[in-house]
Amino acid sequence: MLEESASVGRSTREQILDASRECFAYAGYSGTSLNDIAAEVGIRRQSLLHHFPSKEALYEEVFEQLLSDWFERLADSIQAPSKGLEKVDQVLDAGFRFFADNPAYVTLMRREAIDGGSHLAIDLAATLRPMFDEAVAYFEREMAAGVFRDQDAAQLLLTGYGALLSYFSDAPFLEGLLDEDPLTEAALARRRAHIMDFFRSALEDPE
């Protein structure tokens, strides 16, 4: 029976999404088959197709779920009444913690960026553009008010985006450079502090 293969507290559909996220992150869209995902869950391919009609539909739902979770995680910090570096710290912390909790998301985002979003029915750049524009507008307002040092807000965000995502997507490689697991709590705390110091140095006027 299909539901007998579901672990306690997780429906078969949820297990399929969990397994798909890991498989797609590890092997990419082209390198993952429905048979791979079904085997990971412990069900037959036909049982998987009962929940999702195709690999395309499954991939899109995995990605849209991750985007939704990311947006939800950032929403409270973005909407908070704080200003200046306090808001920057809150948003960075929310994003950093989400990536730490969901390393598969980072890998999937990297793969889609390289592939130009070719496996998605949505325009990934267009989906992320409102959040990017809102962040640029915030930095530009604070710069105009003299709170932050004046510079190219869009480029600052791109640099921060790369600094955040590359740490998680390149973790296996970084372990060889650092002689420690970069995803331990202590290593993550140091990385988060460094990212915040970077933004502080970039945004604060020197004494």
Image (spheres, helix red, strand yellow):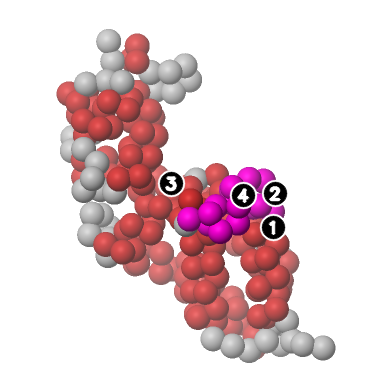
| Disc 4/disc 3 C-alpha distance (Å) | 20 Å
Task: Indicate the secondary structure of the residue bearing disc 2.
Answer: helix
Which corner quadrant holds the C terminus?
Answer: bottom right
Name the kind of residue labelled 2 in the image: Ala
Judge the density around disc 1: few (<14), some (14-19), many (≥20) Cα neighbours within 10 Å: few
Name the kind of residue labelled 3 in the image: Ala
Q: Are marks 2 and 1 in contact (CB under 8 Å)?
A: yes
Q: What residue appears at the point 38 percent right and 18 percent down from the top-left corner?
A: 6
Q: Are marks 4 and 3 in contact (CB under 8 Å)?
A: no
- State the residue position of label 3: 104
Q: What residue appears at the point 34 percent right and 67 percent down from the top-left corner?
A: 126
Instruction: Name the disc covering residue 190, or none.
Output: 1
Task: Indicate the secondary structure of the residue bearing disc 1.
Answer: helix
- State the residue position of label 4: 180
Question: Which image quadrant is residue 124 in?
Answer: bottom left
Residue 85 image offset from top left, x and y in percent: 71, 71
- State the residue position of label 2: 186
| Disc 2/disc 4 C-alpha distance (Å) | 10 Å
| Disc 3/disc 1 C-alpha distance (Å) | 21 Å
Residue 152 image offset from top left, x and y in percent: 54, 86
Question: Which one is in front in this view, the residue at disc 2 or the one at disc 4?
Answer: 4
- The numbered mark, 3 or 1, whose residue comes first in the sequence reads 3
Question: Magenta residues, as a range?
Answer: 173-189
Question: Which image quadrant is residue 95 in?
Answer: bottom right
